[in-house]
Structures are given as C-alpha cells and as structure tokens.
Image (spheres, grey):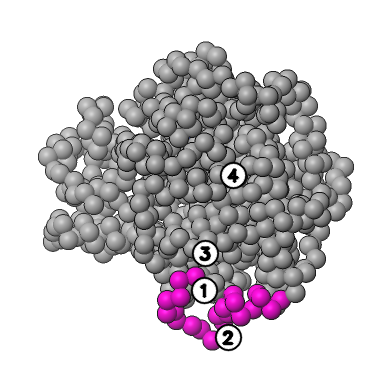
Amino acid sequence: MSTEATQSSALDTLGSETRTFPPPPEFVRQANVSDPSIYERADKDFEGFWAEHARTLTWRKPFTKVLEWEAPYAKWFADGQLNVTENCLDRHVQAGKGAKVAYYWEGEPGDKRVLTYQDLLEETQRCANALKELGVKKGDRVAIYMPMIPELPVAMLACARIGAPFTVVFGGFSAEALAGRIGDSEAKLVITADGGYRKGNVVPLKKNADDAIAQTSTVEKVLVVQRTKQEVAWTAGRDVWWHDIVPRQKADCPAEALDAEHMLYLLYTSGTTATPKGIVHTTAGYLTGVAATTKLIFDVKDHDVFWCAADIGWVTGHSYIVFGPLANGVTGVMYEGTPDFPDKDRWWSIIEQYKVSILYCAPTAIRTFMKWGSEYVQKHDMRSLRLLGSVGEPINPEAWLWYQQTIGGGRCPIVDTWWMTETGMILVSPLPGITTTKPGSATFSFPGVQADVVDEGGSSVPLGQAGYLVITRPWPAMLRGIYKDDERYRDTYWSKYPGRFFAGDGAKRDTDGYFWLMGRVDDVMKISGHRISTTEIESALVSHPKVAEAAVIGRDDPVTTQAIFAFVTLRGGNDSSDALSKELREHVVSKIGSIARPKTIMFTPELPKTRSGKIMRRLLRDIANGQPLGDTTTLADATVVETIRGSTGKEA
Ligand code: PRX
C-alpha cells in the first residue's frame, strides 16, 4: 500500500482553497442543531450521546447496555430489541401521519406514483406475508435485484419486518456478478423485475437473474415485479409474479421483535481482491446512526422533500433513501432513470415539480451538469432548495462553488459527507447550522465520532500534513464484519492500526483542523462515484482466452474522477485490433457490469515489472496520466516502458 493515489494531480488544488462559507443566519435560526457545544458533549460521553439518539426510536425491549467493544468487534444496544419497519412506518402512521407522502416516485418514461406512509406500511406487510408464503423465514437471506421502483424499498422493508437479511444488488451489475452475491449470501429467494428503464433502454433484469440463478444452488423461488412488460422466460414452480401473490395478502403482518445485533442486510462492495466483500450491517445501531445523521446533517423537517439521487443498490440509497429518511418520517423522492432522459434538465424538472428542498448527490453528477451548462438549470424554478449534499468522492472546489451558486442560488449550505459502505452512516461532514464550510473539505467528524490522520507507523501527523484516515472509536452503524470472512475483516480494516478502523483513504487536516479527503490509497477506484477494484477488472480481463496479462489503473478524469485504463498483453498470435478491444470491453461488462467497462485499452507486448516479477503500477499510472515517470531503476527491463509509451490506447 502506498500514498501514490494521494498525489493525483486532480487533487493537488485541495487544501489550497481559502474561501469560507459560514452558515446563513436564516438557516441557523431554524436548524435542528445550531449549538456547537454538541461536539463537546458528544465527545465527553459518546456512549451517552448515542444512547440518547437510540432512545428516540421505538423499542420492543429497551436496552440497558450501550456498547460492548472488544476490538474489532462491536455490539451496540445488545440486550435491546426492535423492528426497523416499526420505526420507519408504524410509528408514523400511529402518530397520525399515515396520509403523509413517503415517496414521490417517477419512472424514467415519465410515469408517476405517490406512496403515503399508510400505503408503504400496507404494501410492506403484504409483501412480508408473501415472503412468508414463499417460505422465507427469519434469518433466511433474500437477494434483491431491481430497478429504482417503489417495490424495491417495499421489498427491503418486508424483509426487515420478518427478520430476513437482504442483499440488494445494483441493477447495473451483470448476471455473473449477481451469481457471486447470491452464492456467497446463499440466498433462498431472489426478488427482481422483468426489466427496468435506463436511458430509454430496457435493462433485462429477469434474464440476468435467470442466468445468475443457473450458476447457483440455493434459490428456491423468484418473485418478479412486472415493470416493462417485455417477454421473459418463466420457470414454472419457481417464478412468481408479484402481482399474483402480493396484492392478495393481508395488509397486516406483525413485525418481529429483533435483537439489536440481528443482521439487517449484507451489501457487497469491492475491495482489493477479485472477490467483493459482503459487508454486514445489523439492526439497532445502524438505524440509530442513519436516523441521527439524517436529522442533524440533512436538517430534515416535517415539510421537507428530500431527494437523495443515488441508486438504492449502493449504500447511499440504503441509508439516505430508505432507512434514515423513513425513520425520520420524511417525504422522499425516487427517480428511476438517467439525468439526461429525455433531456439534460430532467433533475431540475423533478426538483421544480416536487419542490425538493434537500438534494444529495455525487460530485460526478455535479461535474457532468457543469459540463452540460447552467442553461438547463435556469429553465426551472429551483427556489425550493434549502440544503445541498455531496457524497462518494472528493469534490473539487470548482464543482463545489458551481453547486453552491448555480444549483443552490448562493443560499443553500453544502454538506460534503464522507463515509463508506463499511461505515453505514456519514462520519465526516459539516453540520449545516453550525459549520463554516470550505469548498472541497468534508470539515469535521460527526459528534461522537473520532477521526484522525496518521502516518505509516500510526502516529497522528501534524496539521497540514497528509496521511491515512482512521476512525479511532466505534460508532453505532459500523460494519459488524465481512460475511463468512472474519480474517479478511480483521486484515482489511484493523490489522494496520489495531483498535482503529483503517478506511483506505488518504486525508489531511489543515491548520484549522478541517479534514480534506484525498482519494483511495489502495487498488479501489472511484468511477463516477462507483467503487470498483482494479483487481476485479484484471481478473475479468485475464479470464478472456486471448489475454495473457492485464494491469488496470484509474486514470485521472475531470468528470468521472477516475476512468478505467487497462494495459493488456495478449497471448501469442492474437492481434491488437479495434475489434478485440471492443470484445474485451464487453467481456468485462459480462463479468461485472457496465460500470466496469474500461474506457481505454492499451495493448502492450509486456508489462513493466520489478525483478521479482511485480507489476509496477506506479509507472503505469504515470504513463496513463501522461506524467513524467518516477523511479524506473527497479525495472527488470527498462525498454518495456518506452515500448508502452510508443503505443496508443484504444478509447471506448
Ligand atoms: O474514497 C472514499 C470515497 O468513497 C469511498 C467509499 O465508497 P463506497 O463504499 O462506495 O461509499 C460511497 C458512498 C458513501 C471512500 O473510501 N468517498 C465517499 N465520500 C467521500 C469520499 N471521498 C471524498 N469525499 C467524500 N465526501
């Protein structure tokens, strides 16, 4: 592991931005939290702070213990019991908010649905009863592979109601990627749809699910939502239409009282090997963490319309489309498709139409909108917005300022939120009624959370110096492990600095103590905010019969943060043709999904290696980025680099 990624040129400007933005007084006046003493209070007694938040939830059995911490294993509120859906649905309906909108949903073709809390509660219970009829019991795993339609959160909530851990697989993943996740989680049921809409096309979800299930052995039933109405293959006795089984169920399904540490879901994410990790999240601590951060960071109020524009297939959607907002009884927006369908102003028309007050999205989206131009924004009334959020990658000051000015009209605070699939909840972020922000900085750790920047040996680095981000105290929504791989859990996050969580991000704190995140320091790339491992793509490439060797790196990209650049050496006798580069790209797509499609493929007779045979990725990164080459003295064969430099990459 090295700090190479922290030296990427795109990030050089980070930390040199000097403008500051204090919270606007009118925002402070109405903020859910505006007293900075919250930091000190939470720091003095972080367990007490989290217990206070946990007590705002409805418990079946109140907890008496807050935290049991035997590093690296945490249990939060362990002797308590609750049900996530009672907290997300029943208690709001019981409080008379049944008619409040839970989701405004819009399909890509323009179809619309509105679901109130009452609707969502009823549909969740019907679906939960259907799951039971299909043989799903508490503890059984359910894989969910769906487009962004209301049945997706319903399916997740239905699983949570009966205590069946679910694993949502992003609809952009391929059949093979889905098969890996079904296999690892040993899912008994798959919930999918015939298809979903994406950029005017239909994504063949049912077909992918069929292909995936054929490679696995645990699936007994497949529950299928009819979304696009295209023809699909049908396996009698296994496949069941949602509309045949869910509507006829009783809209009453008692919520299971679940132990605080009962597994709520598994979410697979890329690490530094070819196999994704099943990140385990549990019930009460997770809900406490996402409920508290939604309330304090997004400042949600009863009248807000909160649009987190992520896909529910990623952790951002789990925490801030589904569980955090619903736990707070907030109205949310869900949109199925791409931002440029039918035109490049789709998002702004959604904001205008639903009077969205809080928008949460990725810097990659913001940079894309900047590129498209502000005229698309100006066509719409954006005055409903009062708070903006950013997540998933470092946001460059230029994009931050454009977001603030053009989208936020100069009046909305921006919360740049740092967190990961593993952390479950936001850990570093401004509090919009307290924090003076600096464009490009995620500012400070959330109250009760303790973060630090350390050097290779684990000592805190002085302010102003770069190092590795670590979290030095447990937090309630933290991952509880990697499913069925305790060794990898300990190795990946806890072995470098025992007792401290190693995030894998480079960071520095400026002289005012602000955190600046600087990108991954391992072989994990960020492509348009999506997390993809270089090793996963390399392994997909070498599984092609014509490929001898492959090395993948993330090339700096002004819009997508990084773009996938693959160096490929072919087996003897194979041509480095355009047709082959296309074939290899599609091969990677079939193994992982279209998010992993290499942008550039460069065929090279050899890869630069050390004398011990290790591929020198640092050199490849320099070559791909057109930068002067670093130290080449350890190269086994110095001529290799010159040959590669003479080649031209084939762009997608
Ligand atoms: O590198 C960091 C980056 O995203 C990684 C986690 O990716 P994932 O698990 O897919 O979760 C993304 C959404 C929570 C981190 O290791 N990252 C996330 N948020 C930020 C960020 N980098 C800089 N600034 C952020 N605000």
Whole-Å distance between the Cαs marked 2 and 3? Answer: 20 Å
Give the residue number, with chain letter if any, for mark 4: 306
Tell me where the magenta segment starts and ends, as one range.
227-249
- At a point 23% along the width and 29% down the height, the residue shown is 627
**Callout 3: SS:** strand
Mark 4 and mark 2 in contact (Cβ < 8 Å)? no
At label 4, the amino acid type is Phe
112 or 278, which is in the foreground?
Answer: 112
Q: Which of marks 4 and 1 is nearer the N terminus?
A: 1
- Identified at 68% across, 66% down, the residue is 123
Mark 2 neighbour class, 10 Å CA radius: few under 14, some 14 to 19, many 20 or more: few
Q: Mark 1 points at which residue?
A: 226
Task: Inspect the magenta stretch and tell me whether residue 244 lies in it.
Answer: yes
Residue at numbered disc 2: 237
Query: Whole-Å distance between the Cαs marked 1 and 2?
Result: 18 Å
Q: Mark 3 points at which residue?
A: 145
